[in-house]
Image (cartoon, coloured by chain):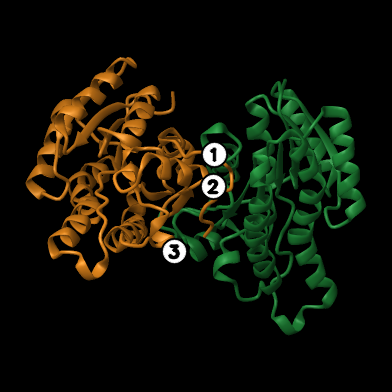
Chain colours: A orange, B green
Amino acid sequence: MRLQNKVAVITGGAQGIGRAIALGMGREGAKVVVADLQGEKAKTVADEVRTLGTDAIAVAVNVASEPSVKRLADQTFECFGRIDILINDAGVYLKSPVVSKSEEEWDRTLDVNLGGNFLCARSFVPAMRTQKSGRIISIASSIAHSGAREFADYAASKAGIIGFVKALARELGPDGITVNAICPGSANTDMPRRHRSEEETMARLRATPLGHVLEPEDIAGPILFLASDAAAYITGQAYNINCGTVMI
Amino acid sequence: MSQVALVTGGGNGIGRAVARRLAATGITVIIADYDHAAAEQVRCEIVDAGGTADALSIDVTVARDAKAVVTDVSQRFGPIDILANIAGGSFYTKRIEDFTWTEWKHVIDTNLKGTFLMCREVAPIMQKQKSGRILNTASNYGVTGSALRVPYSAAKAGIISFTKSLAMELAADGIRLNTVAPGPTDTPRVMEKETGEARKQRWYSSIPLGRTGKPEDLAELYYFLTTPESAAITGQTFHCNGGLL
Protein backbone atom coordinates (compact mmCIF):
# COMPACT_ATOMS: atom_id res chain seq x y z
CA MET A 1 0.00 0.00 0.00
CA ARG A 2 1.48 3.26 -1.17
CA LEU A 3 -0.25 5.65 1.23
CA GLN A 4 -0.27 3.75 4.50
CA ASN A 5 -1.24 6.03 7.40
CA LYS A 6 -1.16 9.18 5.29
CA VAL A 7 -4.02 11.58 5.92
CA ALA A 8 -5.85 12.70 2.79
CA VAL A 9 -8.50 15.42 2.50
CA ILE A 10 -10.64 15.27 -0.63
CA THR A 11 -12.95 18.18 -1.34
CA GLY A 12 -15.83 17.27 -3.61
CA GLY A 13 -15.31 13.73 -2.39
CA ALA A 14 -18.96 12.72 -2.23
CA GLN A 15 -19.42 11.78 -5.86
CA GLY A 16 -17.88 11.23 -9.27
CA ILE A 17 -14.13 11.71 -9.55
CA GLY A 18 -13.78 12.80 -5.92
CA ARG A 19 -15.46 9.63 -4.69
CA ALA A 20 -13.17 7.47 -6.85
CA ILE A 21 -10.17 9.31 -5.40
CA ALA A 22 -11.44 8.82 -1.83
CA LEU A 23 -11.91 5.08 -2.40
CA GLY A 24 -8.53 4.81 -4.17
CA MET A 25 -6.78 6.57 -1.30
CA GLY A 26 -8.54 4.27 1.17
CA ARG A 27 -7.40 1.19 -0.76
CA GLU A 28 -3.83 2.47 -0.55
CA GLY A 29 -4.10 2.71 3.22
CA ALA A 30 -4.69 6.44 3.67
CA LYS A 31 -6.99 7.88 6.32
CA VAL A 32 -9.56 9.84 4.39
CA VAL A 33 -11.51 13.02 5.05
CA VAL A 34 -14.42 13.13 2.61
CA ALA A 35 -15.32 16.82 2.41
CA ASP A 36 -18.29 17.95 0.39
CA LEU A 37 -21.07 20.49 0.31
CA GLN A 38 -23.39 17.47 0.33
CA GLY A 39 -22.68 16.23 3.86
CA GLU A 40 -25.02 13.23 3.74
CA LYS A 41 -23.51 11.91 0.53
CA ALA A 42 -20.05 12.47 2.00
CA LYS A 43 -21.05 10.26 4.95
CA THR A 44 -21.99 7.45 2.58
CA VAL A 45 -18.59 7.65 0.87
CA ALA A 46 -16.80 7.75 4.24
CA ASP A 47 -18.70 4.57 5.17
CA GLU A 48 -17.58 2.96 1.93
CA VAL A 49 -13.97 3.95 2.63
CA ARG A 50 -14.13 2.47 6.12
CA THR A 51 -15.20 -0.90 4.69
CA LEU A 52 -11.77 -0.96 3.02
CA GLY A 53 -10.24 -1.24 6.48
CA THR A 54 -9.06 2.32 7.03
CA ASP A 55 -10.34 5.35 8.92
CA ALA A 56 -12.54 7.92 7.28
CA ILE A 57 -14.70 10.86 8.31
CA ALA A 58 -17.16 13.01 6.42
CA VAL A 59 -17.20 16.78 6.75
CA ALA A 60 -19.78 19.11 5.23
CA VAL A 61 -17.90 22.04 3.72
CA ASN A 62 -18.40 25.00 1.46
CA VAL A 63 -14.94 25.50 -0.01
CA ALA A 64 -15.85 29.08 -0.99
CA SER A 65 -16.37 30.04 2.66
CA GLU A 66 -13.32 30.72 4.79
CA PRO A 67 -14.94 29.81 8.14
CA SER A 68 -16.26 26.58 6.64
CA VAL A 69 -12.82 25.59 5.30
CA LYS A 70 -11.29 26.44 8.68
CA ARG A 71 -13.76 24.07 10.33
CA LEU A 72 -12.74 21.39 7.82
CA ALA A 73 -9.09 21.88 8.79
CA ASP A 74 -9.94 21.87 12.51
CA GLN A 75 -11.88 18.62 12.20
CA THR A 76 -9.09 17.02 10.15
CA PHE A 77 -6.46 17.89 12.74
CA GLU A 78 -8.72 16.92 15.61
CA CYS A 79 -9.43 13.46 14.16
CA PHE A 80 -6.14 12.58 12.50
CA GLY A 81 -3.59 15.10 13.79
CA ARG A 82 -2.02 15.92 10.45
CA ILE A 83 -2.54 16.41 6.69
CA ASP A 84 -0.39 14.74 4.06
CA ILE A 85 -2.50 14.98 0.93
CA LEU A 86 -4.95 17.69 -0.11
CA ILE A 87 -7.08 16.97 -3.17
CA ASN A 88 -8.97 20.01 -4.46
CA ASP A 89 -11.80 18.51 -6.45
CA ALA A 90 -14.86 20.51 -5.38
CA GLY A 91 -16.26 22.33 -8.36
CA VAL A 92 -19.39 23.60 -10.09
CA TYR A 93 -20.21 23.43 -13.79
CA LEU A 94 -22.83 25.96 -14.83
CA LYS A 95 -23.87 26.55 -18.41
CA SER A 96 -24.76 29.91 -19.96
CA PRO A 97 -23.42 32.21 -22.68
CA VAL A 98 -21.12 34.98 -21.49
CA VAL A 99 -23.51 37.76 -22.51
CA SER A 100 -26.28 36.41 -20.32
CA LYS A 101 -24.18 35.02 -17.49
CA SER A 102 -25.09 36.66 -14.23
CA GLU A 103 -22.47 38.11 -11.95
CA GLU A 104 -23.70 35.72 -9.26
CA GLU A 105 -23.08 32.72 -11.51
CA TRP A 106 -19.63 33.99 -12.45
CA ASP A 107 -18.72 34.56 -8.81
CA ARG A 108 -19.98 31.17 -7.75
CA THR A 109 -17.89 29.33 -10.38
CA LEU A 110 -14.74 31.30 -9.66
CA ASP A 111 -15.22 31.23 -5.89
CA VAL A 112 -15.81 27.49 -5.69
CA ASN A 113 -13.55 26.18 -8.44
CA LEU A 114 -10.59 28.53 -8.00
CA GLY A 115 -11.17 30.28 -4.68
CA GLY A 116 -11.67 26.92 -2.98
CA ASN A 117 -8.12 26.00 -3.96
CA PHE A 118 -6.85 29.17 -2.35
CA LEU A 119 -8.80 28.81 0.89
CA CYS A 120 -7.95 25.13 1.31
CA ALA A 121 -4.27 25.75 0.62
CA ARG A 122 -4.25 28.55 3.20
CA SER A 123 -5.78 26.34 5.86
CA PHE A 124 -3.64 23.24 5.26
CA VAL A 125 -0.26 24.55 4.09
CA PRO A 126 1.01 25.69 7.52
CA ALA A 127 0.79 22.11 8.85
CA MET A 128 2.52 20.77 5.73
CA ARG A 129 5.28 23.34 6.13
CA THR A 130 5.82 22.26 9.72
CA GLN A 131 6.04 18.62 8.62
CA LYS A 132 8.28 19.58 5.67
CA SER A 133 6.19 17.37 3.45
CA GLY A 134 2.87 17.33 1.67
CA ARG A 135 1.08 16.80 -1.59
CA ILE A 136 -1.48 19.15 -3.09
CA ILE A 137 -3.28 17.94 -6.20
CA SER A 138 -5.93 20.09 -7.83
CA ILE A 139 -8.42 18.92 -10.39
CA ALA A 140 -8.42 21.28 -13.35
CA SER A 141 -9.91 20.23 -16.70
CA SER A 142 -8.96 19.77 -20.33
CA ILE A 143 -11.40 22.65 -20.87
CA ALA A 144 -8.67 24.86 -19.36
CA HIS A 145 -6.77 24.20 -22.61
CA SER A 146 -9.56 23.80 -25.15
CA GLY A 147 -12.22 26.17 -23.84
CA ALA A 148 -15.90 25.24 -24.09
CA ARG A 149 -18.89 27.13 -25.48
CA GLU A 150 -21.13 28.55 -22.75
CA PHE A 151 -18.67 27.51 -20.04
CA ALA A 152 -16.38 30.56 -20.10
CA ASP A 153 -16.41 30.91 -16.32
CA TYR A 154 -15.62 27.22 -15.88
CA ALA A 155 -12.79 27.36 -18.46
CA ALA A 156 -11.33 30.47 -16.81
CA SER A 157 -11.54 28.94 -13.34
CA LYS A 158 -9.83 25.74 -14.47
CA ALA A 159 -7.07 27.56 -16.35
CA GLY A 160 -6.71 29.66 -13.20
CA ILE A 161 -6.09 26.48 -11.23
CA ILE A 162 -3.14 25.64 -13.49
CA GLY A 163 -1.57 29.04 -12.89
CA PHE A 164 -2.29 28.79 -9.18
CA VAL A 165 -0.69 25.36 -8.96
CA LYS A 166 2.46 26.45 -10.80
CA ALA A 167 2.89 29.48 -8.56
CA LEU A 168 2.19 27.55 -5.38
CA ALA A 169 4.62 24.81 -6.43
CA ARG A 170 7.36 27.45 -6.57
CA GLU A 171 6.34 28.83 -3.19
CA LEU A 172 6.19 25.48 -1.41
CA GLY A 173 8.98 23.52 -3.11
CA PRO A 174 11.61 24.57 -0.56
CA ASP A 175 9.43 23.01 2.16
CA GLY A 176 9.27 19.67 0.37
CA ILE A 177 5.64 20.11 -0.64
CA THR A 178 4.66 19.26 -4.20
CA VAL A 179 1.72 20.92 -5.96
CA ASN A 180 0.29 19.56 -9.20
CA ALA A 181 -2.87 19.67 -11.27
CA ILE A 182 -4.67 17.01 -13.23
CA CYS A 183 -6.66 17.99 -16.32
CA PRO A 184 -9.27 15.33 -16.95
CA GLY A 185 -11.31 15.14 -20.10
CA SER A 186 -15.04 14.62 -19.84
CA ALA A 187 -15.59 11.65 -17.53
CA ASN A 188 -18.42 9.20 -17.02
CA THR A 189 -19.96 10.98 -14.02
CA ASP A 190 -23.09 13.02 -13.32
CA MET A 191 -21.39 16.26 -14.31
CA PRO A 192 -21.61 16.02 -18.15
CA ARG A 193 -25.16 14.67 -17.80
CA ARG A 194 -26.33 17.91 -16.19
CA HIS A 195 -26.42 19.67 -19.52
CA ARG A 196 -26.93 16.84 -22.02
CA SER A 197 -29.14 13.83 -22.63
CA GLU A 198 -27.87 10.39 -21.65
CA GLU A 199 -27.54 9.42 -25.31
CA GLU A 200 -25.59 12.54 -26.23
CA THR A 201 -23.40 12.20 -23.14
CA MET A 202 -22.41 8.61 -23.93
CA ALA A 203 -21.80 9.40 -27.60
CA ARG A 204 -19.44 12.20 -26.59
CA LEU A 205 -17.72 10.08 -23.97
CA ARG A 206 -17.08 7.31 -26.49
CA ALA A 207 -15.75 9.67 -29.16
CA THR A 208 -12.14 9.71 -27.97
CA PRO A 209 -9.03 8.67 -29.91
CA LEU A 210 -8.49 5.72 -27.57
CA GLY A 211 -12.16 4.76 -27.92
CA HIS A 212 -12.18 4.33 -24.15
CA VAL A 213 -14.81 5.95 -21.94
CA LEU A 214 -12.99 7.99 -19.30
CA GLU A 215 -14.05 6.56 -15.94
CA PRO A 216 -13.48 8.26 -12.56
CA GLU A 217 -11.02 5.45 -11.73
CA ASP A 218 -8.89 6.43 -14.75
CA ILE A 219 -8.41 9.81 -13.08
CA ALA A 220 -7.97 8.46 -9.56
CA GLY A 221 -5.05 6.23 -10.65
CA PRO A 222 -2.72 9.03 -11.74
CA ILE A 223 -3.68 10.98 -8.62
CA LEU A 224 -2.62 8.06 -6.43
CA PHE A 225 0.69 8.07 -8.31
CA LEU A 226 1.17 11.82 -7.74
CA ALA A 227 0.30 11.40 -4.06
CA SER A 228 2.81 8.59 -3.58
CA ASP A 229 6.53 8.70 -2.85
CA ALA A 230 7.17 7.68 -6.46
CA ALA A 231 6.28 11.22 -7.58
CA ALA A 232 8.54 13.04 -5.10
CA TYR A 233 10.34 14.98 -7.85
CA ILE A 234 7.23 16.08 -9.76
CA THR A 235 5.84 19.51 -8.98
CA GLY A 236 4.23 22.41 -10.80
CA GLN A 237 2.79 20.20 -13.51
CA ALA A 238 -0.65 19.88 -15.08
CA TYR A 239 -0.98 16.34 -16.38
CA ASN A 240 -3.66 15.57 -18.95
CA ILE A 241 -5.88 12.50 -18.69
CA ASN A 242 -8.32 12.54 -21.55
CA CYS A 243 -8.00 9.43 -23.72
CA GLY A 244 -6.13 11.54 -26.27
CA THR A 245 -8.78 14.21 -26.90
CA VAL A 246 -6.48 17.14 -26.09
CA MET A 247 -2.71 16.99 -26.52
CA ILE A 248 -0.92 20.07 -25.29
CA MET B 1 3.25 -14.54 -19.24
CA SER B 2 5.64 -11.73 -18.48
CA GLN B 3 5.43 -8.50 -20.44
CA VAL B 4 8.33 -7.63 -22.72
CA ALA B 5 9.95 -4.19 -22.67
CA LEU B 6 12.61 -2.90 -25.01
CA VAL B 7 14.63 -0.02 -23.56
CA THR B 8 17.01 1.86 -25.85
CA GLY B 9 19.81 3.65 -24.10
CA GLY B 10 19.24 1.23 -21.24
CA GLY B 11 22.92 0.87 -20.40
CA ASN B 12 23.35 4.14 -18.53
CA GLY B 13 21.66 6.93 -16.64
CA ILE B 14 17.90 7.23 -16.97
CA GLY B 15 17.69 4.23 -19.31
CA ARG B 16 19.44 2.03 -16.78
CA ALA B 17 17.11 3.14 -13.98
CA VAL B 18 14.06 2.51 -16.18
CA ALA B 19 15.31 -0.95 -17.18
CA ARG B 20 15.86 -1.84 -13.53
CA ARG B 21 12.50 -0.40 -12.42
CA LEU B 22 10.55 -2.33 -15.04
CA ALA B 23 12.47 -5.54 -14.36
CA ALA B 24 11.79 -5.22 -10.63
CA THR B 25 8.08 -5.62 -11.36
CA GLY B 26 8.60 -8.86 -13.30
CA ILE B 27 8.75 -7.41 -16.79
CA THR B 28 11.28 -9.03 -19.15
CA VAL B 29 13.59 -6.20 -20.15
CA ILE B 30 15.78 -6.03 -23.23
CA ILE B 31 18.46 -3.41 -22.85
CA ALA B 32 19.58 -2.09 -26.22
CA ASP B 33 22.49 0.31 -26.12
CA TYR B 34 25.28 1.63 -28.33
CA ASP B 35 27.59 0.81 -25.43
CA HIS B 36 27.32 -2.97 -25.29
CA ALA B 37 29.44 -3.33 -22.18
CA ALA B 38 27.10 -0.98 -20.29
CA ALA B 39 24.03 -2.88 -21.50
CA GLU B 40 25.62 -6.14 -20.41
CA GLN B 41 26.38 -4.66 -17.00
CA VAL B 42 22.74 -3.66 -16.50
CA ARG B 43 21.62 -7.09 -17.68
CA CYS B 44 23.81 -8.64 -14.95
CA GLU B 45 22.42 -6.24 -12.31
CA ILE B 46 18.87 -7.23 -13.23
CA VAL B 47 19.58 -10.94 -13.35
CA ASP B 48 21.45 -10.78 -10.04
CA ALA B 49 18.38 -9.13 -8.51
CA GLY B 50 16.23 -12.03 -9.73
CA GLY B 51 14.84 -10.41 -12.88
CA THR B 52 14.84 -11.40 -16.53
CA ALA B 53 16.85 -9.36 -19.01
CA ASP B 54 18.95 -9.46 -22.13
CA ALA B 55 21.47 -7.02 -23.57
CA LEU B 56 21.83 -6.09 -27.22
CA SER B 57 23.94 -3.64 -29.21
CA ILE B 58 22.17 -1.02 -31.24
CA ASP B 59 22.84 2.19 -33.11
CA VAL B 60 19.36 3.70 -33.12
CA THR B 61 20.29 5.99 -36.02
CA VAL B 62 20.72 2.98 -38.33
CA ALA B 63 17.48 1.59 -39.77
CA ARG B 64 18.79 -1.94 -40.20
CA ASP B 65 19.93 -1.99 -36.54
CA ALA B 66 16.46 -1.00 -35.36
CA LYS B 67 14.91 -3.69 -37.55
CA ALA B 68 17.38 -6.37 -36.51
CA VAL B 69 16.93 -5.70 -32.80
CA VAL B 70 13.14 -5.66 -32.95
CA THR B 71 13.06 -8.84 -35.04
CA ASP B 72 15.48 -10.60 -32.74
CA VAL B 73 13.58 -9.57 -29.61
CA SER B 74 10.19 -10.62 -30.96
CA GLN B 75 11.51 -13.97 -32.13
CA ARG B 76 13.16 -14.81 -28.85
CA PHE B 77 10.85 -13.17 -26.31
CA GLY B 78 7.54 -12.69 -28.13
CA PRO B 79 5.68 -9.50 -28.96
CA ILE B 80 7.01 -6.27 -27.48
CA ASP B 81 4.53 -4.72 -25.02
CA ILE B 82 6.56 -1.68 -23.99
CA LEU B 83 9.06 0.39 -25.96
CA ALA B 84 11.02 3.01 -24.05
CA ASN B 85 13.09 5.20 -26.36
CA ILE B 86 15.71 6.68 -24.08
CA ALA B 87 18.83 6.63 -26.29
CA GLY B 88 19.83 10.23 -26.89
CA GLY B 89 21.90 13.11 -25.68
CA SER B 90 22.92 16.68 -26.37
CA PHE B 91 26.59 15.74 -26.98
CA TYR B 92 27.77 19.29 -27.73
CA THR B 93 27.38 22.74 -26.21
CA LYS B 94 28.42 25.41 -28.67
CA ARG B 95 27.27 28.29 -30.81
CA ILE B 96 25.25 27.53 -33.91
CA GLU B 97 27.95 28.75 -36.28
CA ASP B 98 30.37 26.25 -34.77
CA PHE B 99 28.12 23.24 -35.33
CA THR B 100 29.06 21.13 -38.33
CA TRP B 101 26.43 19.39 -40.44
CA THR B 102 27.77 16.06 -39.15
CA GLU B 103 27.31 17.15 -35.55
CA TRP B 104 23.81 18.44 -36.29
CA LYS B 105 22.91 15.09 -37.87
CA HIS B 106 24.43 13.22 -34.92
CA VAL B 107 22.17 15.00 -32.45
CA ILE B 108 18.99 15.02 -34.54
CA ASP B 109 19.41 11.41 -35.63
CA THR B 110 20.27 9.96 -32.23
CA ASN B 111 17.34 11.64 -30.51
CA LEU B 112 14.62 12.11 -33.10
CA LYS B 113 15.34 9.77 -36.00
CA GLY B 114 16.17 6.97 -33.57
CA THR B 115 12.76 7.42 -31.97
CA PHE B 116 11.13 7.28 -35.41
CA LEU B 117 13.06 4.18 -36.51
CA MET B 118 12.26 2.27 -33.33
CA CYS B 119 8.56 3.24 -33.42
CA ARG B 120 8.35 2.26 -37.09
CA GLU B 121 9.57 -1.24 -36.29
CA VAL B 122 7.60 -1.78 -33.09
CA ALA B 123 4.23 -0.20 -34.04
CA PRO B 124 3.14 -3.04 -36.39
CA ILE B 125 3.76 -5.60 -33.65
CA MET B 126 1.66 -3.61 -31.20
CA GLN B 127 -1.03 -3.02 -33.84
CA LYS B 128 -1.33 -6.76 -34.34
CA GLN B 129 -1.75 -7.19 -30.58
CA LYS B 130 -4.12 -4.24 -30.29
CA SER B 131 -2.15 -3.01 -27.30
CA GLY B 132 1.16 -1.48 -26.38
CA ARG B 133 2.81 1.45 -24.73
CA ILE B 134 5.56 3.61 -26.18
CA LEU B 135 7.47 6.10 -24.06
CA ASN B 136 9.63 8.67 -25.75
CA THR B 137 12.10 10.94 -24.07
CA ALA B 138 12.22 14.70 -24.51
CA SER B 139 13.65 17.33 -22.17
CA ASN B 140 12.58 20.59 -20.60
CA TYR B 141 14.75 22.10 -23.36
CA GLY B 142 12.30 20.72 -25.90
CA VAL B 143 9.83 23.28 -24.58
CA THR B 144 12.01 26.18 -23.43
CA GLY B 145 14.88 25.87 -25.88
CA SER B 146 18.47 26.15 -24.70
CA ALA B 147 21.26 28.43 -25.85
CA LEU B 148 24.24 26.41 -27.15
CA ARG B 149 22.07 23.31 -27.51
CA VAL B 150 20.13 24.26 -30.62
CA PRO B 151 20.05 20.84 -32.31
CA TYR B 152 19.20 19.07 -29.06
CA SER B 153 16.35 21.46 -28.27
CA ALA B 154 15.01 21.08 -31.81
CA ALA B 155 15.21 17.29 -31.63
CA LYS B 156 13.45 17.15 -28.27
CA ALA B 157 10.69 19.53 -29.40
CA GLY B 158 10.38 17.28 -32.43
CA ILE B 159 9.93 14.23 -30.20
CA ILE B 160 7.04 15.89 -28.35
CA SER B 161 5.18 16.59 -31.56
CA PHE B 162 6.14 13.26 -33.12
CA THR B 163 4.69 11.49 -30.10
CA LYS B 164 1.39 13.40 -30.27
CA SER B 165 1.04 12.64 -33.97
CA LEU B 166 1.80 8.96 -33.62
CA ALA B 167 -0.46 8.77 -30.55
CA MET B 168 -3.33 9.94 -32.79
CA GLU B 169 -2.36 7.41 -35.46
CA LEU B 170 -2.19 4.44 -33.11
CA ALA B 171 -4.92 5.25 -30.56
CA ALA B 172 -7.56 3.23 -32.38
CA ASP B 173 -5.32 0.17 -32.03
CA GLY B 174 -5.19 0.58 -28.26
CA ILE B 175 -1.58 1.75 -28.31
CA ARG B 176 -0.64 4.60 -26.00
CA LEU B 177 2.31 6.92 -26.56
CA ASN B 178 3.55 9.53 -24.14
CA THR B 179 6.62 11.67 -23.73
CA VAL B 180 8.65 11.96 -20.56
CA ALA B 181 10.55 15.23 -20.30
CA PRO B 182 13.29 15.05 -17.69
CA GLY B 183 14.81 18.20 -16.24
CA PRO B 184 18.42 18.35 -15.08
CA THR B 185 19.16 14.80 -13.98
CA ASP B 186 22.27 13.43 -12.28
CA THR B 187 23.36 10.85 -14.85
CA PRO B 188 26.95 9.60 -15.06
CA ARG B 189 27.36 11.33 -18.44
CA VAL B 190 26.41 14.70 -16.98
CA MET B 191 28.32 14.21 -13.75
CA GLU B 192 31.51 13.50 -15.71
CA LYS B 193 31.36 17.00 -17.16
CA GLU B 194 30.25 18.91 -14.10
CA THR B 195 31.01 18.57 -10.41
CA GLY B 196 28.21 18.24 -7.90
CA GLU B 197 29.11 21.67 -6.54
CA ALA B 198 28.91 23.28 -9.97
CA ARG B 199 25.53 21.70 -10.55
CA LYS B 200 24.31 22.99 -7.21
CA GLN B 201 25.40 26.50 -8.11
CA ARG B 202 23.78 26.29 -11.52
CA TRP B 203 20.48 24.68 -10.65
CA TYR B 204 19.46 24.60 -7.04
CA SER B 205 18.19 28.15 -6.79
CA SER B 206 15.94 27.71 -9.83
CA ILE B 207 14.49 24.33 -8.89
CA PRO B 208 11.70 24.74 -6.31
CA LEU B 209 12.32 21.30 -4.80
CA GLY B 210 15.94 22.34 -4.25
CA ARG B 211 17.77 19.52 -5.97
CA THR B 212 18.48 18.05 -9.39
CA GLY B 213 16.74 14.86 -10.45
CA LYS B 214 17.91 11.31 -9.95
CA PRO B 215 17.48 8.69 -12.67
CA GLU B 216 15.24 6.81 -10.22
CA ASP B 217 12.84 9.79 -10.03
CA LEU B 218 12.33 9.49 -13.76
CA ALA B 219 12.10 5.71 -13.68
CA GLU B 220 9.02 5.91 -11.48
CA LEU B 221 7.26 8.09 -14.05
CA TYR B 222 8.16 5.81 -16.97
CA TYR B 223 6.93 2.84 -14.98
CA PHE B 224 3.65 4.58 -14.06
CA LEU B 225 3.02 5.26 -17.75
CA THR B 226 3.26 1.52 -18.52
CA THR B 227 0.69 0.52 -15.89
CA PRO B 228 -3.10 0.21 -16.19
CA GLU B 229 -3.33 3.26 -13.90
CA SER B 230 -2.40 5.33 -16.95
CA ALA B 231 -4.87 3.56 -19.28
CA ALA B 232 -6.61 6.82 -20.27
CA ILE B 233 -3.43 8.76 -21.00
CA THR B 234 -2.01 9.18 -24.49
CA GLY B 235 -0.27 11.89 -26.50
CA GLN B 236 0.84 13.77 -23.39
CA THR B 237 4.11 15.22 -22.18
CA PHE B 238 5.15 14.52 -18.59
CA HIS B 239 7.69 16.90 -17.18
CA CYS B 240 9.64 15.71 -14.15
CA ASN B 241 12.01 18.45 -13.09
CA GLY B 242 11.45 19.43 -9.47
CA GLY B 243 9.38 22.41 -10.61
CA LEU B 244 12.06 24.03 -12.78
CA LEU B 245 9.45 24.32 -15.52
In the figure, B171 relative to A115: above or below? above
Q: Residues within 10 Å of mark 3 (few under 14, many from 20)?
A: some
- Percent across and percent down for residue B141 are 59, 65
Kind of residue at disc 1? His
Q: Residue at x 73, y 24 (%)?
A: B48
Q: Residue at x 54, y 39 (%)?
A: A212
As rendered, which of B133 and A33 lies closer to the eye? B133
Whether residue A24 is visible, yes or no, is yes
Secondary structure beneath disc 3? helix
Q: What mark, if any, has residue A212 been given in the picture?
A: 1
Q: Residue at x 29, y 20 (%)?
A: A48
Q: Chain of mark 2?
A: A
Q: Which residue lies under the disc numbered 2?
A: A208
Task: Place residue B243 in its image quadrant.
Answer: bottom left
Q: Residue at x 32, y 30 (%)?
A: A22
- On the picture, is B169 further left or further right than A183? right
Q: Chain of mark 3?
A: B
Q: Residues within 10 Å of mark 2 (few under 14, many from 20)?
A: many
- On the picture, is A4 further left or further right than B28? left
Q: Residues at marks 3 and 1, common chain?
A: no
Q: Chain of mark 1?
A: A
What is the C-alpha distance between the residues marked 3 and 1?
39 Å
Secondary structure beneath disc 2? loop
Secondary structure beneath disc 1? loop
Quadrant in which the N terminus of chain A appears: top left
Kind of residue at disc 3? Ser
Q: Are marks 1 and 2 in contact (CB under 8 Å)?
A: yes
Q: Residues at marks 2 and 3, common chain?
A: no
Q: Residues within 10 Å of mark 1 (few under 14, many from 20)?
A: some
Whether residue B133 is visible, yes or no, is no
- On the picture, is A214 further left or further right than B71? left
Q: Which residue lies under the disc numbered 3?
A: B206
